[in-house]
Amino acid sequence: MSRLRVGSDEHKRRFCRAFVETFHAYEPREIRWPALEPAARERLRGLPFWGEAIGSERTAAARVRAMAEIEPDPTLREAIALQAYEEERHARLLEGLLAFYEIPIPDEAPSWPRDPEWGFVRMGYGECFDSFFAFGLFRLAQETGFFPAALVQIFDGVMQEEARHILFFANWAAYRTGRLPALRRPAFVVRRGLAIALQAFGRIRTALDLRRGTRDADNFTMQVPEELAGEGELTLGRFVRTCVDENARRLAPYDPELLRPRFVPELVGLTLRILPRSG
């Protein structure tokens, strides 16, 4: 049984410390992008989701920054502001990649959320969904050589930052729930449930659109290039098991008493139990 009481000052100190102390300093403009073979360059340029990827990072940055500005607790505010910086850095990193490989860069600016807490909650659960699938996609891209090794090395750190983000959010959401007055707690729990439902519905809608041969501009992590199958068939079972394994591996280095995001892994775990092992 965990000795850490969720919602306590010690809980707050530990999940904020775990986030701040694992920060990795780098500057996107100093990245030396590798020259790619023509085929690899065309594969990169042909991916359909670069605009959505940058838009997602810009939106996340705005929502996290807005939350940091209203957070009165200095320990929480430091960690949330650091996450906002990392989201902004992810957007700048993608902008640098697109500029170097001559891929069009969208110039839409994200809107500032009118309700910072709601924006942060929606963004947090969105990252829990997207990161889970992104971990699996990234692993497949590495194993099949879809992404050149030099790009894998650059973006591996981004994947690990996403793991830190969802770990922080899972603990923040639980801490926030536990610290609210009893009369305000049910409303926040309902907000959390609504945010999860909206994110789940969006992913289901995208999956149905992909089966019909259409693409949704949202949820770009679910748009799986066929080349990621490598020499074998990329079945749903293989993809899901890769996501489960990578999610566990990415979160393993951190304090074992901190909460982990549970909804997506448990939902997908249920899917795995009903899928045939050959799938």
Image (spheres, rainbow, N blue to C red):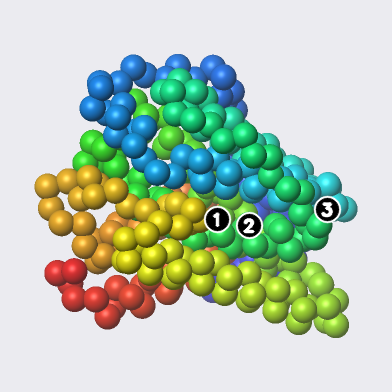
Q: Does 113 appear above or below 24?
A: below
Is there a contact, CB below 8 Å, between mark 3 and mark 2?
Answer: no
Quadrant of res 24 = top right
Is there a contact, CB below 8 Å, between mark 1 and mark 2?
Answer: yes
Q: Residue at x 49, y 23 (%)?
A: 99
Residue 167 x %, y %: 57, 56
Residue 111 x %, y %: 73, 48
Q: Nearer the viewer, residue 188 or 234?
A: 234
Q: Residue at x 63, y 57 (%)?
A: 123
**For mark 2, what is the residue?**
123
Q: What SS does tag 3 mark?
A: loop
Label 3 vs label 2: CA separation?
16 Å
Q: Residues within 10 Å of mark 3 (few under 14, many from 20)?
A: some
**For mark 1, what is the residue?**
127
Q: Residue at x 37, y 59 (%)?
A: 214
**For mark 3, what is the residue?**
71
Q: Nearer the viewer, residue 12 or 230?
A: 230
Label 1 vs label 3: CA separation?
20 Å
Residue 245 x %, y %: 33, 58
Check disc 2 and give the amino acid type.
Met
Q: Quadrant of the N terminus?
A: bottom right
| Horizontal arrangement in the rendering, residue 120 relative to residue 278 (left or right) | right
